[in-house]
Image (spheres, rainbow, N blue to C red):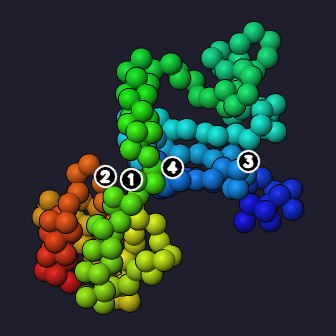
Amino acid sequence: MGARCRETDTAFVLDATQAVGAMNLDMARIQPDFLVASAYKWLLCPYTLGFLYAASHHHQGRGIEVHQSNHPGDGLAPGARRFDMGEAFNQINLPMAVAALEQITQWTPAAIGESLRPLTDRIAEAGAERGLTAPAASRRVGHYIGLHSKEAWPDGMIEALAAAQIHLCLRASPHLLFNTSDDVDHLFAALDRLL
């Protein structure tokens, strides 16, 4: 996709929120113009933070916001900093983000994704036993899975699951620090009652 974008002089922009931190991304191979990620997901950072990669050939571009922190003096900040948000110097969230990113670096994104693969595999297997489908193991990442039903999901299913202390949307993305195989069993026991 990136190669085709470059052939047609089209900006290649990726939202990598569901990937950054839980799998290796080869930026030299991908060559995005811009890559963004919400930091709260697999980067384990506090809410309100996000990260933007801007390829060097965009470093002379104009950011969406122009304010004092990215517009010092008569020009924009150098490099990708020109795209930064206002009030970027958060004295609480940034140290928390640094600690989270240091932990991610120590664990490594590849290890994080693979540590979650047994849970997503278990979800796929339990789903298959109930007639739900997921992409083949060779076509999915270890940290994220979606289940498909030929029938419509029941109205109020998310609310009913929440009442059973199961909080999710219609995809399964186990949390690195909090979910276990017991949680998968609990999920499918509740789904059995609902479906």
The amino acid at mark 1 is Ile
Disc nearer the start of the sequence (1/2): 1
Task: Tell me residue 67's x, y (percent).
Answer: 66, 20
Task: Tell me residue 174's x, y (percent).
Answer: 31, 60
Viewer can see residue 193: yes
| In-image side of 106 versus 75 (left or right) | left
- Cβ atoms under marks 1 and 2 closer than 8 Å: yes
Disc nearer the start of the sequence (1/4): 4
Task: Tell me residue 126's x, y (percent).
Answer: 25, 80
- Cβ atoms under marks 1 and 4 closer than 8 Å: no
Quarter in which the N terminus is drawn: bottom right
Query: Which residue corresponds to the image point at 35% horizontal and 88% vertical from the top-left?
Result: 151
Say what secondary structure mark 3 lies in: loop
Query: Which residue does the numbered mark 4 point to in the structure image?
Result: 20
Query: Which residue corresponds to the image point at 37% horizontal and 77% vertical from the top-left?
Result: 147
Say what secondary structure mark 2 lies in: loop
